[in-house]
Image: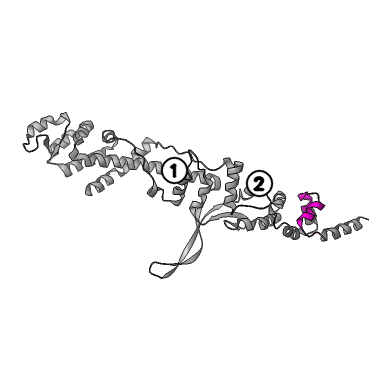
Amino acid sequence: MMKLIDSIKNIIYEQLEDYEDVDKLFGGDIKSIFNYYKKSDQLDELISLLDYKPLLLIPTLLDTGDKKYEELAWRLVNPYVLSDVIKQGDKYILSLNDREDVVKLFGDWVGCSSKTAEMVFQEDLWENWEDYASNEKFEQLVEVLTEENYQELVTSVIENYGNKEVENARGEFDHWIEEDNLSDNPKAFILTPDRILGASEDRYAFTALIDSPDLSDFTDITERTYDRAYNDVIINEYFNEYHKSLNGLLGEGKDVQRGSSMRLSKNGLTANVPVYKYEFDVTDKFWDVIKEYTKSTGAYEIDEYGWLDVLRYVMNNSDYKGGLLCPDVDEYPDEEKVNKVFNDIFIEELKWNLIK
């Protein structure tokens, strides 16, 4: 009797032409459907019936914990993610054409800027950065200089302005004006090396000496150098925090060569140029994202372009991993870091700008 019933069932199942028929027969129970086709060794037939509803079966396949059924799940989802995912053995590799593709994972609202993320991952942050003004003045910056840098500044003043006439409206140097009594310029005095060295023994007195329109190069260079250091620290903070945020989500990205292509050079010659992809090992989250998308949308197909877009969807709509990335970067950089960078670059900037 049981054999007869099984035979009748098999005849009925063989007449099923599409998934809707199967769904009705099993009362919409995907696990029962899977178990039947699995028992009958007809999973390939079920896969073909689910050609347009791949997400329906994927959770059931993955829940078996069997690598064989994970391969079937991959067959179902592969057409939707082949633009940016490569399967290497048991690993799933997110393979992006450009670094800036990851920008879509960052939020764009008050306190978050996709424009900043774009600059970071296009690696032209330094070229396109709009500088902040530190508003620090020469008087304060002289106190920040290391002794070596301070002595270099003093030496530069001697080398460039020693024994030249300079004007100075500060009362501290009226006695030099009276002493020199320059008839052609009664507000000026001769800036001798001895006078420079004497004033340099006290940094405040030295800043008073440099407070002259004739010596403005030194104040301008010092203040610009500090502003550069100030912005370099901020830029590095943005660069590091945005990469840290991305790495926390996807792991560390790597540039990997994936073949090569023929390119035409400016002189009309062709060259075989390596093609690099920006890649992440997303094995530990590949299927979680797919399942979260299935749960969130209730869809049977993936209506996104690639796995990265699926990830963005679940981050934005299901708060996956806390939602779209929004690195917290302090726009007021650490003073010690700025002072260190300032001193590291000061002599080079001073010499370079005085040459110009």
Q: Amino acid at mark 2?
A: Thr
Magenta stretch, residue numbers: 16-33
Q: Identify which residue, 294 or 338, lies in the foreground.
A: 294
**Residue 346 quadrant:** top left
Residue 118 location (% of width, % of height): 46, 48
**Residue 50 quadrant:** bottom right
- Total tally of numbered discs in the picture: 2
Q: Residue at x 60, y 43 (%)?
A: 317
- Mark 2 secondary-structure assignment: helix
Residue 327 location (% of width, % of height): 49, 41
Q: Is residue 225 visible?
A: yes
Q: Identify which residue, 151 or 223, lies in the foreground.
A: 223
Crowd rating for badge 1 (residues with CA inside 10 Å; few <14, some 14–19, many 20+) = many
Q: Amino acid at mark 1?
A: Tyr
Q: Main secondary structure of the magenta part?
A: helix
As measured in the structure, the alpha-carbon distance from the residue carrying label 1 to the one carrying label 2 is: 34 Å
The residue that mark 1 highlights is 238
Say left or right for 234 vs 356. right
- Mark 1 secondary-structure assignment: helix
| Quadrant placement of the N terminus | bottom right
Front disc: 1 or 2: 2
The residue that mark 2 highlights is 297
Residue 73 location (% of width, % of height): 68, 55
Residue 335 vertical placement versus 311 (above, below): above
Say left or right for 242 vs 12. left
Q: Are marks 1 and 2 in contact (CB under 8 Å)?
A: no
> Is residue 86 found inside the magenta-colored segment of the image?
no
Q: Residue at x 19, y 41 (%)?
A: 157
